[in-house]
Image (cartoon, grey):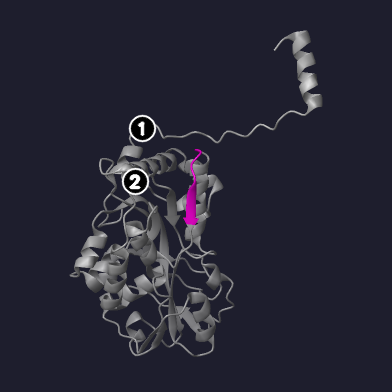
Amino acid sequence: MRLAIAAWLAALLALPVQAQEAQLSIMTGAPTGTYIQIGRDLSGLMGQCGKSVEVVESAGSLENFLAVRQRPNTQFGIVQNDVLEYMQTFAGNDPAIARAITGVRIAFPLYDEEVHILARRDIATLDDLAGKRVAIGTENSGTYLTASLILSLSGTEPAEKLLLAPADALPQLKAGQIDAFFYVAGAPASLYAEGDIDGERFHLLPIQDPTLQAVYTPASLPAGTYAFQPDAVELVAVKAVLMTYEYDPSHNAYHRSSCQGVSDMASLILTRIDSLRTEGHPKWQSVDLTDIPPGWQIGACVNRGISPDYQADCAAPTPQAMPDSEANAAYRRNICAVIGC
């Protein structure tokens, strides 16, 4: 795993850094996921200010993290906050990893996502996954990242770790082809709510390991969150964050315009958070802008944008006037001749 990450980073870090004026984009996730909907909310917010932000689909947190570090015209990415712990755990001594982490910053904390592990009923605890067939998500997804880290930190070694998306893992679990699968998603997750899961055969594993509770946020799924889950389940949650980069306006035009875009986005999120909560994705209602996860630093361009005296470079789009027809032009001339214009 370390060699694969290092090779990927080496390729990304070899990409040229843009020096011209920046376009703005945000890395999100799969087309049906929450990340892309949050990205669209933010793009719409900037659109109200006359600015264009491209919303980019991706595999998830790892791809987003590295894209903000090196992909041209990519100032934002939505990632899980444990991505830093993941990088340090699996390749913390690698110079390429250290370079990737340098300059990475947070724009805002977003919302919590619960770590669901659906397993056969005879598997009672996380430790019981040892020697089992466990699906951990597709490579570079947030589920893959968190599942890999949780298994490593807890010292649990499945017999097989399968790279399956949760939607593909559920039918395999029902068919007895795997024993459990991870899925990191804000509860209630539609996969479980609509997945016709037999509570006599399957359940959500509790996650109560002290090491994991120190790295993640302890959480609880209330009884009845899902039809197959009659009792409350203690587990952990990972926070999604809006990530950016530490742009230096004195460096070049690209850094200046990127920093401007980050500052404007920060200003708009702060001043229009109520609008996001009422008109955007329901997850905005649980966003606490003060809940900075451990290990992350707020970007200087973000702090510039949320300063009380900051004015976003905000020009609402000007609608294009349609040319008058000859009849309408004659009407206006006559009106003006009688009453003045």
User: Is 275 placed above or below 235 here?
Assistant: above
Tell us which disc is closer to us: 1 or 2. Answer: 2
Quadrant of res 153: bottom left
Work out which quarter of the rendered image holds the N terminus and state it. Answer: bottom left
Question: Mark 1 falls on what kind of element?
Answer: loop
Q: Is residue 64 left or right of residue 280?
A: left
User: Is 114 placed above or below 2 here?
Assistant: above
Q: How many marks?
A: 2
**Residue 277, horizontal then vertical, whole percent:** 50, 47
**Residue 196, horizontal then vertical, whole percent:** 59, 78
Using a 10 Å C-alpha cutoff, classify the residue at mark 1 as few (fewer than 14 neighbours), some (14 to 19) or many (20 or more).
few
Residue 51 colored in magenta in the image: yes
Q: Is residue 224 left or right of residue 333?
A: left
N-term mark: 1 or 2: 2
Q: Residue at x 48, y 90 (%)?
A: 177
User: Mark 1 sits on what residue?
Assistant: 310
The magenta segment: 49-55
Q: Nearer the viewer, residue 23 or 89?
A: 23
Q: Residue at x 49, y 69 (%)?
A: 223
Residue 178 colored in magenta in the image: no
Name the mark on residue 62.
none
Using a 10 Å C-alpha cutoff, classify the residue at mark 2 as few (fewer than 14 neighbours), some (14 to 19) or many (20 or more).
many
Residue 94 in sight in this render = yes
Q: Separation of disc 1 and disc 2 at Cα?
A: 21 Å
User: Mark 2 sits on what residue?
Assistant: 254
User: Is 227 placed above or below 309 here?
Assistant: below
**Residue 186, horizontal then vertical, whole percent:** 46, 63
Q: Nearer the viewer, residue 274 or 148?
A: 148
Quadrant of res 239: bottom left
**Residue type indicated by callout 2:** Tyr
Q: Residue at x 57, y 33 (%)?
A: 318
User: Is 157 placed above or below 289 here?
Assistant: below
